[in-house]
């Protein structure tokens, strides 16, 4: 298998043969050999069933990146911890109650983190942002591929465009190849700003159908449709999506 593969283990809606749950989890398998999990859905059973069905092993991870501490992104953490005892886990500032007693090795990201030191060269987490002053912090993951930077977001409570900007800053880049994940019912203005920051746009999870339709109509050819089981493969041939 050439290239870097992003497997959507859980999105809110799936395809026959996979379980559905309100949640979000993506496995990154990089062409340089490392694997990182981004978010862990809402339920252990769903994450376990879907990863097995998709042939996506949750063992041997270099790191676990948690966008923010809402239940629909941290619910599967006990499974991740069982399969990877002592796993380095990158989290934004917060209470981290969900991680208590799991044996994960939390690393609190305050100003952006390069994951090369954890054995995942080409992975970086942008500086975290707080959403609207309610003490909820969120971070996004950037993955360098041969074709450009791919940015994964969780729920984008502080704004998807702002989270992408932080990853671009960390990567020293001014444009991403792709951004996908939950955009949290973004405004058209936000999506227009996003279109200036990334070539391909994949609204998933909490983005809402309006975001999907807007991108489809205003930026034809640049929408990536995402659901549970979607595989996004970035290789020398560009970006390929399998459903
Ligand atoms: Zn959330
Ligand atoms: Zn969410």
Image: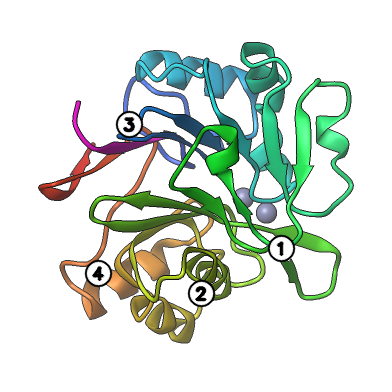
Q: Quadrant of residue 180?
A: bottom left
Residue at x 37% of width, y 52% of height: 144
Between residue 146 and residue 65, name the one nearer to us.
Answer: 146
Residue 111, numbered label: 1
Q: Earlier in the sequence, mark 4 or mark 1?
A: 1
Circle 3 or circle 1, nearest the eye: 1
User: In this view of the protein, can residue 39 be seen by the observer?
Assistant: no
Q: x%, y% of residue 236?
A: 13, 46
- 170 versus 33 height, above or below: below
Bin the neighbour count of mark 4 within 10 Å (Cα to Cα): few under 14, some 14-19, many 20 and up.
some
Q: x%, y% of residue 130?
A: 76, 68
- 70 versus 52 height, above or below: below
Residue annotated with mark 3: 15
Q: Earlier in the sequence, mark 3 or mark 1?
A: 3
Distance CA(mark 3)–CA(mark 1): 38 Å
Between residue 177 and residue 174, name the one nearer to us.
Answer: 174
Distance CA(mark 3)–CA(mark 2): 29 Å
Bin the neighbour count of mark 1 within 10 Å (Cα to Cα): few under 14, some 14-19, many 20 and up.
few
- C-beta proximity under 8 Å, tags 4 and 1: no
Distance CA(mark 1)–CA(mark 2): 18 Å
Circle 3 or circle 2, nearest the eye: 2
Circle 1 or circle 2, nearest the eye: 1
Question: Where are the magenta residues, as a range?
Answer: 1-7
Q: Secondary structure at mark 1?
A: loop
Residue annotated with mark 2: 161
Distance CA(mark 4)–CA(mark 3): 21 Å
Q: Secondary structure at mark 2?
A: helix
Residue annotated with mark 4: 216
């Amino acid at each position: 298998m050439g290239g870097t593969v992003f497997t959507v283990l859980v999105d809110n809606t799936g395809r026959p043969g996979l379980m559905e749950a309100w949640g979000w989890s993506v496995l990154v398998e990089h062409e340089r050999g490392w694997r990182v999990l981004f978010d862990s859905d809402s339920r252990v059973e769903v994450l376990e069933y879907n990863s097995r069905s998709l042939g996506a092993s949750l063992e041997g991870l270099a790191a676990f990146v948690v966008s923010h501490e809402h239940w629909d992104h941290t619910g599967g953490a006990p499974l991740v911890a069982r399969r990877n005892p002592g796993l380095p886990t990158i989290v934004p500032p917060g209470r981290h109650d969900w991680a208590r007693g799991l044996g994960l090795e939390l690393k609190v990201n305050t100003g952006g983190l390069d994951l090369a030191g954890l054995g995942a060269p080409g992975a970086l987490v942008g500086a975290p942002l707080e959403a609207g002053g309610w003490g909820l912090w969120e971070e996004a993951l950037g993955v360098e591929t041969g074709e450009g930077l791919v940015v994964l977001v969780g729920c984008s409570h502080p704004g998807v465009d702002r989270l992408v900007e932080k990853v671009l800053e960390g990567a020293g880049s001014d444009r991403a190849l792709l951004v996908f994940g939950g955009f949290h019912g973004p405004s058209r203005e936000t999506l227009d700003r996003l279109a200036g920051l990334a070539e391909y746009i994949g609204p998933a999870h909490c983005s809402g159908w309006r975001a999907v339709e807007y991108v489809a109509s205003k930026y034809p050819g640049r929408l990536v449709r995402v659901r549970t089981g979607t595989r996004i493969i970035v290789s020398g041939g560009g970006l390929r999506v399998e459903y």
